[in-house]
Amino acid sequence: FLEGAFREGEGEHIDHPHEDTYLQAIIDSTGKLARPVKVAVDCGNAVPGPAMTKLLDMIGAEHIDLYCDWDNTEPNHGADPTREYNMVDLAKAVVYNGCEFGLGADGDGDRIGAVDENGDFVYPDRLIALLAEDVVGSEEGKDLLIYDVKCSMNVEKAILSAGGRPMMAKTGHSFMKRVLADHPDSLMAAEMSGHIFMNDRGWYGFDCSLYNAARILELWSRRDARFSEELNRLAPNLPTTGEVKVPCAEEDKIETVEAIKNAFTDHEASTIDGVRVRFTEDGEQTGWYLARKSNTEPILVMRVEAINQDKLNQMLALIDERISPIINIEKLLA
């Protein structure tokens, strides 16, 4: 190949445009909107932009478009809707134009993020709770909903409240796809990172910003409420440290996570991806602590969440007492 030793011959070039076929397949699954939802969309000048605006026209949405043309220099902001600083312009557009909410897509069109009608950033796991309530009970013999270890405990609560069966899985969309394929009784799988894999209504169980935007809009077109109110009902924001990157040498990761697990043998814990310690009181979950190794950086990813600030402070104090002798967690405690 490098020497240019190619065979020569004659061939035929056939163009098979697929965009319209794909967009129609989305609509065949989601259906059109029950009413014209007013939404703002921001695609960060990335791949999904032109197709997103076309899809919104096709399903009957009233939409305000931001940065939906292609420009790989990213002249406005990065195309990652899970980072609040990338959603600032979208938030302003939602408030200024009186939209019901706003949606953002990522660079290659497989993740989705949102802001509510007030322009407040919505963590992607709250969207999981919204979708979960809508899909449970929709298909006979399918009641399993899968979510990754970084998601809020409100996701499990929303699934159970809807009558579904929650299952926690390892973070990483390749792992999530595998788990989804292994469980044909699953309705959907999703990650905190904004990857959502719908597996109902004849859809194919892969993550697509276009499809998920249409699903959220179709769902919302059957609601008569404020976006923030529904999210607060299903998955209110809880006190949390957020995701914290704790430095840890590559060669120490496995041993350190094992030591953290052993420090909480008196608590229930999941070890499918690092260790996620469950805190309870009178049989009710009050919070959790996650420590998992990154596959790409010399760090451990940690996060703590609790039902209120007092519980969060108590949990952090206990984590400090037990984990600080193992690894420096000043960044988590800050």
Image: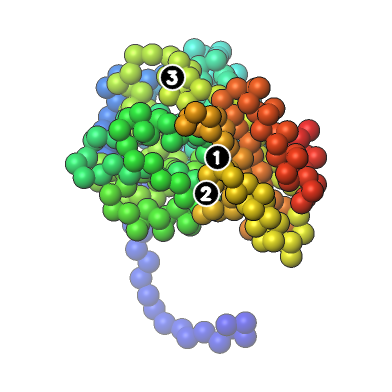
Closer to the camera, 143 or 20?
A: 143
Q: Eyeballing the image, is 274 above or below 14?
A: above
Q: Alpha carbon of mark 2 to alpha carbon of mark 3: how far?
A: 27 Å
Amino acid type of the residue tagged 2 in the rendering? Ser
Residue 25 pos. (x, y %) = 28, 44
* Residue 87 in view of the camera: no
Q: Alpha carbon of mark 1 to alpha carbon of mark 3: how far?
A: 23 Å
Q: Eyeballing the image, is 87 above or below 16?
A: above
Q: Which of marks 1 and 3 is in front?
A: 1
Q: In which quarter of the image is residue 57?
A: top left
Identify the mark nearer the N-term, 2 or 1: 2
For label 1, the SS is strand
Kindly identify which residue carries mark 2: 270
For label 3, the SS is helix
* Residue 231 in view of the camera: yes
Disc 3 crowd, CA 10 A, few/some/many (<14, 14-19, 20+): few
The answer to whether marks 1 and 3 mark residues whose Cβ atoms lie closer than 8 Å is no
Closer to the camera, 220 or 181?
A: 181
Q: Alpha carbon of mark 2 to alpha carbon of mark 1: how far?
A: 8 Å
Kindly identify which residue carries mark 3: 233
Which residue is depicted at the point 35% across and 50% down? Answer: 205
The answer to whether marks 2 and 1 mark residues whose Cβ atoms lie closer than 8 Å is yes
Q: In this view, does 128 lie to the left or right of 304?
A: left
Kindly identify which residue carries mark 1: 278
Closer to the camera, 2 or 113?
A: 113
Disc 2 crowd, CA 10 A, few/some/many (<14, 14-19, 20+): some
Q: In this view, does 80 lie to the left or right of 187?
A: right
Q: Eyeballing the image, is 322 above or below 240?
A: below
Q: In which quarter of the image is the N terminus?
A: bottom right
Identify the mark nearer the N-term, 1 or 3: 3
Amino acid type of the residue tagged 3 in the rendering? Arg
